[in-house]
Amino acid sequence: MRTLHWTDRLLAHVDRSLKTMTGTLPANNDFDYESRADELTPEEQAKSRQLMRVNHCGEVCAQGLYHGQMLSARRAATKAHLAHAAEEEQQHLVWCQQRLRELSGQTSYLNPLWYGASFLMGAATGLMGDKVSLGFIAATEEEVCKHLDRHLAELPERDHRTREIIAQMQADEAGHEQAALDEGGASYPAAVKQLMAFQSKLMTSSTRWI
Ligand SMILES: [Fe+2]
Ligand SMILES: [Fe+2]
């Protein structure tokens, strides 16, 4: 098997990042839905579109975070753990991208900005050591689960398809939180979690509209 040169890896990374940010990753069909977007009223579609644009950006952030952390993680076991979670996150991203398309919505223009910020944040926490880095994942996923709860409450009742996607994502995110703690992640103080919640609010409120 040919060993990849670092330039090949860099190009592969740039290609994946661009597709992540622009919502053009190849589609998959591992979700079997019952309802379709055209059964919803225009108002319901608009609401779902708005929330799914935010969730798509959340998954773009997850990619940035994991890509950054994989770059600076120390232990091989941590790198493997991060790679596995990032793969599941990529599935989430594709689900959001597809649903957004069905709802005739578009991805956020702010995706490159949030991807870059998350990548830097991931790489920086990775430099502080695996314990800090895994703890950051746990704290982030905790916040994501709360955020998805709020979205489930806000989503149109009849949009079963979007609900199904969010519920599955929420179950996976809770799994990521627990796995990061089991892998040795540090428990973050409440003040840091509050700061992270504020940053998440900034992302979710901006990408609703832009
Ligand atoms: Fe996710
Ligand atoms: Fe996750």
Image: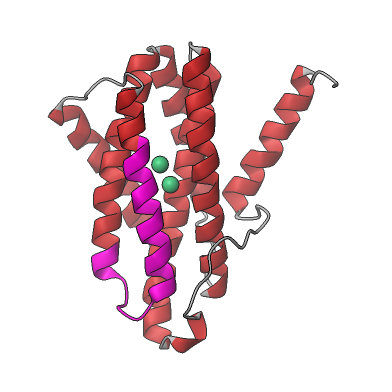
The image position of residue 156, as x and y in percent, is 32, 77
Could you tell me if residue 202 is visible in this image? yes
- Give the quarter of the image for residue 140: top left
**From the image, which quarter does the C terminus lie in?**
bottom left
- Magenta segment range? 152-176
Q: How many marks do you count on the picture?
A: 0
Say above or below: 10 vs 46: above
User: Which of the pair 169/117 is nearer the observer?
Assistant: 169
- Could you tell whether 43 is left or right of 110 in the image? left
Specify whether residue 169 is painted magenta: yes
Specify whether residue 121 is painted magenta: no
The image position of residue 28, as x and y in percent, is 63, 58
- Could you tell whether 180 is left or right of 72 in the image? left
Q: Residue at x 55, y 45 (%)?
A: 90
| Secondary structure mainly formed by the magenta segment | helix
User: Which of the pair 174/55 is nearer the observer?
Assistant: 174
Q: Which residue is drawn at 40% across and 72% down?
A: 48
Colour basis: secondary structure
**From the image, which quarter does the N terminus lie in?**
top right
Could you tell me if residue 210 is visible in this image? no
Seen as rendered, the residue at the extreme left is 190
Q: Residue at x 37, y 21 (%)?
A: 133
Say above or below: 34 vs 89: below
- Could you tell whether 172 is left or right of 83 in the image? left
Seen as rendered, the residue at the extreme right is 2
The image position of residue 112, as x and y in percent, is 54, 44
The image position of residue 109, as x and y in percent, is 52, 55
Q: Residue at x 72, y 33 (%)?
A: 12
